[in-house]
Amino acid sequence: DTGVSQNPRHKITKRGQNVTFRCDPISEHNRLYWYRQTLGQGPEFLTYFQNEAQLEKSRLLSDRFSAERPKGSFSTLEIQRTEQGDSAMYLCASSSWDSSYGYTFGSGTRLTVV
Amino acid sequence: KQEVTQIPAALSVPEGENLVLNCSFTDSAIYNLQWFRQDPGKGLTSLLLIQSSQREQTSGRLNASLDKSSGRSTLYIAASQPGDSATYLCAVRRSGGYNKLIFGAGTRLAVHP
């Protein structure tokens, strides 16, 4: 297992287009998290899954954002009708059921909306 | 509401210096605290994890301490090297069944030869 994998690494899209990101967590981890990070700031929580169940969503996650984790394996984060304010680094992390060993983050997907 | 603050926001030092990065949090009811390193444009690399019952953790030249009652953690870097240049982030996980991490804004460290 090589850790948390995120694809694509970079995405440039025109305003109004839809984009989808993928995250493959560490296989033994049943918890998966999405965070967003803007320049000069720490990551902010968006949502988290335990297995396939989405258990918490931040108020940052507007109606244009949707996340799924079918079968409790990989996860996708979709942003519809992108806006320039959506430009950020989108980070995925995974952890064991009790998070006792902390969180492992992926390399992130850098989204630029032009 | 848990808030995490990191001081200083930026630090520039010559190679070889010993450094202390500070992290403070407003709610002492934490489950654990994790220090991360982030290189420009990259994801986060975990450095040290301190459980709420622990006082410190060490890994190589890094030592992190935790004083839960005062809401503080420090990351000590011994004999800094140019390769240590990065942003260092601390994050806390609240106790009581909360599962998300609350991050500080980070300390940007530059170590020059």
Image (cartoon, rainbow, N blue to C red):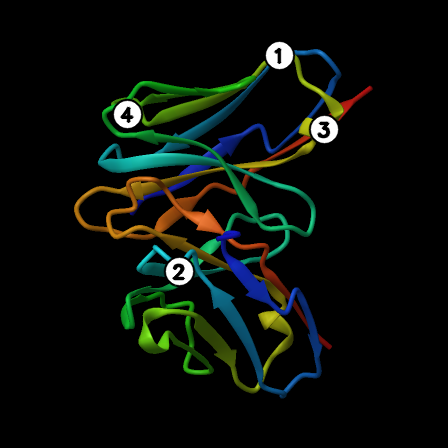
Under circle 3, the secondary element is helix
Q: Position of residue A88 (x, y in %)?
A: 61, 63
Q: Which residue is mark 3?
A: B83
Q: Quadrant of residue B74?
A: top left
Instruction: Say yes or no: labels 2 and 3 on the same chain.
Output: no
- Residue at mark 2 to residue at mark 1: CA–CA distance: 34 Å
The residue to which callout 2 is attached is A33
> Residue flagged by tag 2: what amino acid is it?
Tyr
Q: Are marks 1 and 4 in contact (CB under 8 Å)?
A: no
**Pointer 1 or 3: first along the chain:** 1
Using the rendered image, report if marks 3 and 4 lie on a common chain: yes
Front: mark 4 or 2: 2
Q: What SS does tag 1 mark?
A: loop
**Is the same chain shared between marks 1 and 4?**
yes
Q: Amino acid at mark 4?
A: Lys
Q: CA distance from mark 3 to mark 4?
A: 30 Å
Is residue A49 visible in this depiction of the protein? yes
**In the displayed image of the protein, which residue is found farthest to the right?**
B113
Assess whether mark 3 and mark 2 are in contact (beta carbons under 8 angstroms).
no
Residue assigned mark 1: B18
